[in-house]
Amino acid sequence: MGQDSKIRVLVAKPGLDGHERGAHVVAYGLRDEGFEVIYTGLRQTPEQIVSAAVQEDVDVIGLSILSGAHLTLTKKVMAGLKAKGANDILVTVGGVIPEEDKKTLEEMGVGGVFTSGSKIKDIAAFIRTKIGGNA
Amino acid sequence: MEEKLALMIEAAGENSERALAKLISHVEDRKTGWKDIMKTIYAKTGRTCVIGVTGSPGAGKSSLVGEFAKRLGDRGYTIGIIAVDPSSPFSGGAVLGDRIRMRDISTYQNIFIRSMATRGMLGGLCQAARDVVRIMDFAGKDIVIIETVGVGQDEIEVVSAADYVMLVTYPGGGDSVQAIKAGVMEIGDLFVVNKCDREGADIIVSEISAMLDLSTETAAKIPPVIKTSAFTKEGIDELMDILSEFIQKKKKGPHYQKDHVRQEVISILETEMVSIIKERITGNGNMEKELELILSGKSDPYSIADKLMKRFTVIKNVEEKRKGDFQ
Ligand SMILES: Nc1nc2c(ncn2[C@@H]2O[C@H](COP(=O)(O)OP(=O)(O)OP(=O)(O)O)[C@@H](O)[C@H]2O)c(=O)[nH]1
Ligand SMILES: [Mg+2]
């Protein structure tokens, strides 16, 4: 048994920018790849993201950030996860991320950074390799 | 039981959100030991009030749940919310978006929200959802709210297992009254016409009331029909009064009712039978040869079904006997 298991992904948009398209494309794209995607909508605070990730017991968090505030926001999310003992969740960041910030994000514990040109198939493959299991 | 599971149960019973979430996943995924978990916690359940919310897609169910859960939360109740959305029949994946409308309460200490996909569980959805309700019950939630889209038979069954069922519709849905007519009316304890900030709500209220008058035997049993708006908050106070009355009543009532228990045993058995059929009778290429017999005109589907059933019973008997020999 246990064949019903699915990879669960939280797609979240922290920060104040109102561009939902990218996050939408990722959410529906990952659904088509067989993932269960929890989509929480615009303008989530780091606290809301952490709380949703814990309650939904997701395997992966995908943060979509276009506002330029990716470093501060991601840092808060990482700290929040740690405080709740949930820092084993794979965190990925997507959006407009300058090359030089990638390393900083990885040092914070981010598992993968995807810039705007990334293909859904590649993101899905990345998640599957990292997590294993169905979907 | 594995020690890891026992510890998870203990922690979930002591208010750990993370343990509660993990426990739900373990049971939802039907991982080894899930049934032991359910057996262990059962005795400590039955005290929660289960409110089912269903109705047409986009009627504002999540918005309403967000609103009344917030108010119940402010009154000090601990609350679990289960929001069920369909899985894609093509990929098996799902986008679960009900949390979007519950943002205000997503960080409430006393509210726990869990999204759940239907996962094409051939009638198994009902049991899986019921199990999740029960885990939240065990974890001490005073109230569990379960939202489903009132489209599929499975989803309707899920809410009908609740103590109290709220049917939500709205003006402009086109089929708003029709949607309720289609076999779900009987399960409603309360009818809500949401989006009453829009035109046409009153007409729908009177249409539903007329329908209920026709189909309900005694006037005392006619469920209330109210209009609400999750935007302007009109009607929400009335909704709260109705819900509070029910919650008080449930607190005094029995934990489990015979009809529910009977239905649950049947539902567990049905789910198991389906998986036995899939795994042991029709699966593993067991019936490929038999299909050929039908195609070549040597047999028919009825005889083959009989034959497979018989073969399965024989195997089962041999297994039982062997087990006996070893004891
Ligand atoms: N005008 C108006 N719009 C509303 C009201 N309640 C919800 N909505 C809107 O209706 C849409 C659907 O609301 P939801 O709360 O997601 O509805 P739902 O029934 O949970 O939808 P599904 O779960 O997708 O079936 C959203 O755009 C809401 O903002 C209301 O009282 N008035
Ligand atoms: Mg909803």
Image (cartoon, coloured by chain):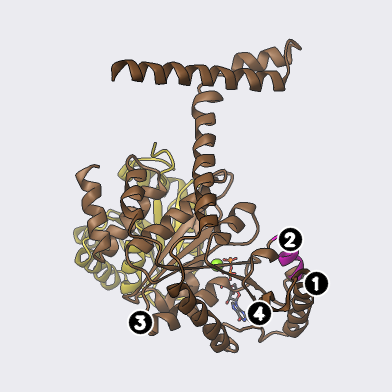
Chain colours: A yellow, B brown
Mark 1 burial class by Cα count in 10 Å: few <14, some 14-19, many 20+ = few
Residue at the image position 44 percent from the left and 74 percent from the top: B252
Residue B182 on the magenta segment: yes
Q: Nearer the viewer, residue A20 or B13?
A: B13
Q: Nearer the viewer, mark 1 or mark 2?
A: 1
Image coords of residue A123 (percent x, y): 40, 49
Q: Quadrant of residue B169?
A: bottom right
Q: Tag 2 or tag 1, which sits nearer the N-term?
A: 2
The tag on residue B224 is 4
Task: Name the quadrant where ligand 2 sits.
Answer: bottom right
Residue at the image position 74 percent from the left and 60 percent from the top: B182
Image coords of residue B45 (percent x, y): 37, 60
Q: Secondary structure at mark 3?
A: loop
Q: Quadrant of residue B42?
A: bottom left
Residue at the image position 40 percent from the left and 53 percent from the top: A8
Cα separation between marks 1 and 2: 15 Å
Cα separation between marks 2 and 3: 37 Å
Q: Are marks 1 and 4 in contact (CB under 8 Å)?
A: no
The tag on residue B214 is 1
Question: For the residues tagged 1 and 3, is the chain the same?
Answer: yes
The tag on residue B182 is 2
Q: Chain of mark 3?
A: B
Three-letter amino acid code of the residue under disc 2: Ala
Q: Chain of mark 4?
A: B
Q: Secondary structure at mark 4?
A: loop
Give above or below for A32 relative to A2.
below
